[in-house]
C-alpha cells in the first residue's frame, strides 16, 4: 500500500546529518576562498621578492656612490679629477689633414678633436700683420696667425708640458705634443703663403719664435731630424730658396711642401741609395703634395674608380715620394658624392698615401678602414 502523504518522515540517524545541496556548495566556497587567500599571499611574497631585487638594481651601491661623487668637495678623490695633460684625453691621432682648417667653426680645435695630425692656415701679409683666410675678401682684423693658431697652440702645449717636478733626468724632458694618447706624435702645421713669398717669409719666421724658445719645433740638428710637438711646413708661395738658406732658416725648423707630380718613379728604375741625393729630401722637405686631378690627368670616374693609367701615375708618384723620405698628400680630392669620396679614400690608402686631405673631419674619423687600420703607423711617423 502506498504511504500516506501525512506519514511522519523517517527518523534521522544519530551522527549522520543529512547534507543537502546548499550545504555542499557552502563547503566548496569556503575551500575556494582559502585557496584564493593562499594564492594572494604567495603572490605578495613573490612581488616583494621582485621589488627587493629591483631596488638593488636601481639603488646605487657604495662603489657607485664613490664613482658618482668622485672629486667633489668632501668626497673621495677631491682634487684628483683632472691631471695636467688631459686636454686631449681619449683622442686618438689619425692621418688626416684638416683642409682649409681656418674655415671651420672652431679652427684648430675641431681638427684636434677629430684626431687629425695636420692642420692648414692660409696667410696674407698686409701692413706687417699676418692674416688668415681663404681670400682677401674673407680677411678680418681679428683673424690673424697669432690669434687662430700661434697663441692657442702655445696654450695647449704649455699645458701638455708642465714643469716635471718629480723628474730630473734629461730624457724625460722632451716636450710632449698635443695628443695625450700619443705624446710623441707631432702636429703638422701647413702654412700656405698667399702673398709674395720673399716678403712674407721673415714675418712668418718671426711669428714662430715662441715655439722655438720652448723647443716645440721639429728641426734639423747636425744633419739629423729632431722631432718636436709641431712640424712647420711651408706651401703655396713659400720660397724653397729660403727653406734651404742658412741665413733665412738658421734653425732649420721650417720645411718645404715639395711637388709630388714631379716625383714619378717607375717600378723598374732603381732609387738612389740615399734620399739626400734628391733635391727634395727630409733635411729640407716634409710633404710632397699635388692636386689629385692635376696629378692623374683628371679625377677618377663617378664611382671613384681609377683607370689603369691613373693607378700607374699614382703608384709612381708615391714610389718617388717615399724614395725621397717624404710624406705624400693629394689635395683637391672630390668630397661628393659620399660613396665616390669614400672609394677614392680607400684606393689612396691602399696604394700608400700618407695623409688624407679631408674636409669632412667626422667622416674621416669614424671611417671603418677594415684591414687598413693603422696603415700609416707601419711606415712610421717620419
Image (spheres, rainbow, N blue to C red):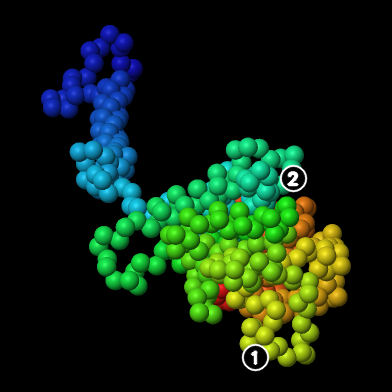
Task: Using the image as rendered, state which of residue 241 and residue 152 is in the foreground.
Answer: 241
Task: Using the image as rendered, state which of residue 91 and residue 141 is in the foreground.
Answer: 141
Which residue is at a point 78% across and 53% down the rendered structure image? Answer: 337
Residue 338 vs residue 34: left or right? right
* Residue that badge 1 annotates: 273
Residue 4 vs residue 136: left or right? left
Residue 135's label in the rendered image is 2
Q: Is residue 286 visible?
A: no
Q: Return the residue found at the far top.
A: 6
Residue 102's label in the rendered image is none
Q: Would you place residue 206 above or below residue 351 in this image?
A: above
Measuring from the top left, give residue 62's x and y in whole percent: 22, 45
Q: Quadrant of residue 249?
A: bottom right
Q: Earlier in the sequence, mark 1 or mark 2?
A: 2
Measuring from the top left, give residue 137's x and y in whole percent: 75, 39
Label 1 and label 2: CA atoms lie apart by: 43 Å
Number of other residues with Cα within 10 Å of mark 2, as a class: few under 14, some 14 to 19, many 20 or more: few
Q: Is residue 13 visible?
A: yes
Q: Would you place residue 325 above or below residue 214 in this image?
A: below
Q: Quadrant of residue 233?
A: bottom right
Measuring from the top left, give residue 5's x and y in whole percent: 31, 10
Total count of labels: 2
Q: Return the residue found at the far left.
A: 14
Task: Name the element at disc 1.
Answer: loop
Which residue is at a point 74% across and 43% down the rendered structure image? Answer: 136
Amino acid at each position: 500500500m502506498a504511504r500516506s502523504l501525512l506519514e511522519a518522515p523517517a527518523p534521522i540517524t544519530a551522527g549522520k546529518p543529512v547534507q543537502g545541496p546548499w550545504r555542499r556548495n557552502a563547503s566548496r566556497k569556503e575551500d575556494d576562498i582559502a585557496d584564493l587567500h593562499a594564492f594572494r599571499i604567495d603572490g605578495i611574497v613573490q612581488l616583494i621578492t621582485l621589488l627587493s631585487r629591483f631596488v638593488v638594481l636601481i639603488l646605487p651601491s657604495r662603489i657607485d656612490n664613490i664613482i658618482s661623487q668622485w672629486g667633489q668637495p668632501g668626497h673621495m678623490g677631491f682634487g684628483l679629477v683632472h691631471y695636467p695633460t688631459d686636454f686631449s684625453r681619449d683622442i686618438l691621432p689619425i692621418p688626416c689633414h684638416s683642409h682649409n682648417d681656418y674655415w671651420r667653426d672652431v679652427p684648430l680645435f675641431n681638427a684636434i678633436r677629430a684626431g687629425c695630425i695636420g692642420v692648414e692656415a692660409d696667410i696674407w701679409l698686409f701692413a706687417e700683420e699676418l692674416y688668415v683666410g681663404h681670400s682677401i675678401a674673407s680677411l678680418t682684423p681679428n683673424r690673424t696667425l697669432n690669434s687662430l693658431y700661434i697663441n692657442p697652440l702655445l696654450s695647449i702645449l704649455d699645458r701638455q708640458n708642465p714643469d716635471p717636478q718629480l723628474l730630473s733626468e734629461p730624457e724625460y724632458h722632451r716636450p710632449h705634443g698635443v695628443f695625450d694618447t700619443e705624446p710623441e706624435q707631432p702636429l703638422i702645421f701647413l702654412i700656405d703663403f698667399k702673398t709674395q713669398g720673399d716678403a712674407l717669409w721673415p714675418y712668418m719666421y718671426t711669428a714662430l719664435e715662441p715655439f722655438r724658445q720652448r723647443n716645440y719645433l721639429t728641426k734639423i740638428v747636425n744633419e739629423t731630424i729632431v722631432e718636436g710637438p709641431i712640424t712647420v711646413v711651408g706651401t703655396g708661395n713659400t720660397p724653397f730658396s729660403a727653406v734651404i738658406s742658412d741665413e733665412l732658416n738658421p734653425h732649420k725648423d721650417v720645411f718645404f711642401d715639395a711637388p709630388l707630380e714631379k716625383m714619378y718613379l717607375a717600378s723598374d728604375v732603381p732609387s738612389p741609395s740615399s734620399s739626400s741625393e734628391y733635391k727634395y729630401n727630409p733635411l729640407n722637405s716634409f710633404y710632397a703634395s699635388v692636386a689629385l686631378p692635376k696629378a692623374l690627368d683628371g679625377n677618377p670616374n663617378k664611382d671613384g674608380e681609377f683607370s689603369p693609367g691613373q693607378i700607374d701615375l699614382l703608384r709612381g708618384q708615391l714610389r718617388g715620394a717615399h724614395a725621397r723620405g717624404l710624406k705624400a698628400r693629394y689635395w683637391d680630392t672630390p668630397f661628393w658624392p659620399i660613396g665616390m669620396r669614400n672609394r677614392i679614400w680607400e684606393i689612396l690608402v691602399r696604394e700608400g698615401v700618407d695623409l688624407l686631405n679631408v674636409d669632412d673631419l667626422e667622416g674621416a674619423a669614424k671611417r671603418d678602414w677594415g684591414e687598413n687600420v693603422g696603415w700609416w703607423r707601419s711606415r712610421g711617423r717620419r
